[in-house]
Structure formats: C-alpha cells, structure tokens
Image: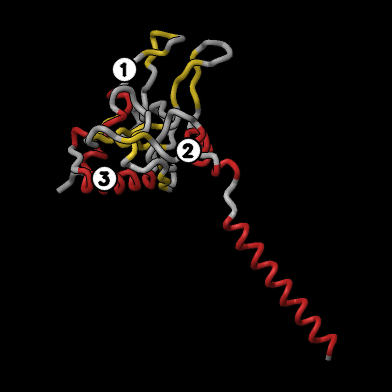
Amino acid sequence: MTYSTESHAVRNMGRISAVIGLVLTALTVPAGDAEARRTGNVRTQVIDMVVIHSTGGPTCDAGTGKPIWVGAGTLAENLRQIEADHKLGIHYMIDRDGTLRASVPEDQMVHHVFHYSGRSIAIELINEGDGRDPFPDAQLASLVKLLRDIKQRRGITRDGIKRHSDLDHARLSCDRTQRRKVDPGAAFPYESILDRVFQP
C-alpha cells in the first residue's frame, strides 16, 4: 500500500512539474522579441492616409554597389527585421494566407515613407512587389477588412489610401535609372481593393 501511494504521489508530482514547465514555456518571451521595438514616435499630425507596401523590392547591394531585388521573405522574418530596426517601423503586416499581425500602435508614428509618415498608417503585404507575384485572395480579403476598419475609425477617404510607389519617386543611388520604391507593384489590384473598401 505504501508503495502504491508513493507511486501515485510520484506520478502526480511528475504531472505537476510538466504543467509548470508548460506554463513557464508559454510565459517565456524569446530573446529576439524582448528586444523588438514595437513603439513609435509621438504623432504631431492627424492621420488621414494609409500607405500599402510590399516586403520585396529593389535596393542597392552594400557589397557590390549594384542594384538587387530583395525577396518577399516570411511574415516572421520581416517582423523580426523591421522591429529590430532603430528607425523604421510598420503598423500592420499581412501574410499570404491572410494572417494579420500588428506591430507599432496606430497612434504612434513610424518611418515608412518619406514626407508622409507623420500622417499615415503603414501596412506591409508579404509579396515580391515585382508586378508578377500574385496577391492571394485570403491576403486581399484580410487587407480589405483592415482598411474598412481603419476607414471607419479614422475617416479615411478613397484618396487617402495610397501605394508606396504613389508617394516615393526617388531613384536608387546605385542606378539612377531605377526607382527606389515600386511597391506593392503592378500585380496589386489597387482600384479593385478601393472599390471593395468603399462599396456602399
């Protein structure tokens, strides 16, 4: 009987230890997340614009000084990279499957587009941004839902939803014949998205 009771107690202690381990694992924040920057600057302008970006796009290779195309990457990779940056930021990111992740709160300003960051909300879409990579239906549905919500809360007009390429016309420093920002690219169904957001 004593053996049976001790075995039962040992089994219970094992279960309790396992539960405690699971709770501690759930509460543990990975080192990368603990260092992530999810705050922006204080806004001094009223929000009247949303800017749509894609994660892929042209840039200058630091090693060769030549133009390269940065791929779309994954949601986790992009959030980790942008939240580790001391200057840049984003408010929302939407994956190809429609998964939406928030980063910096809307009421805080992040640097995401020259001259317009102070008055705008930034949305990144996981996409190559090359005009050929399609935007899946699930991603676009998630974007439309988010834009309708922002429009409702912030009073954003149709003219207030912009593509990054609408606002930044600068050229690459390593190749003045190429634009620096072309996202979200020609494959993005811009007018169709606006129609869905502002349908009666």
Of discs 2 and 3, which sits in the foreground?
2
Residue at 49% across, 30% down: 85
Give the labeled residue for mark 3.
150
Quadrant where the N terminus sits is bottom right
**Picture coordinates of residue 87 (x, y %)?**
44, 28
Give the labeled residue for mark 2.
37
Q: Amino acid at mark 3?
A: Ile
Whether residues under marks 3 and 1 lie with C-beta atoms below 8 angstroms apart, the answer is: no
Mark 2 or mark 3, which has the lower sequence index? 2
Q: Amino acid at mark 2?
A: Arg
Vertical position of residue 68 compared to residue 46: above or below:
above
Element type at mark 1: loop
Q: Is residue 33 left or right of residue 13?
A: left
Element type at mark 3: helix
Q: Is residue 180 left or right of residue 158?
A: right
Q: Nearer the viewer, residue 90 or 2?
A: 2
- The numbered dot on residue 169 is 1
Binning the other alpha carbons within 10 Å of mark 1 as few (below 14), some (14 to 19) or many (20 upward) gives some
**Picture coordinates of residue 144 (x, y %)?**
29, 45
Residue at 39% across, 42% down: 136
Of discs 3 and 1, which sits in the foreground?
3
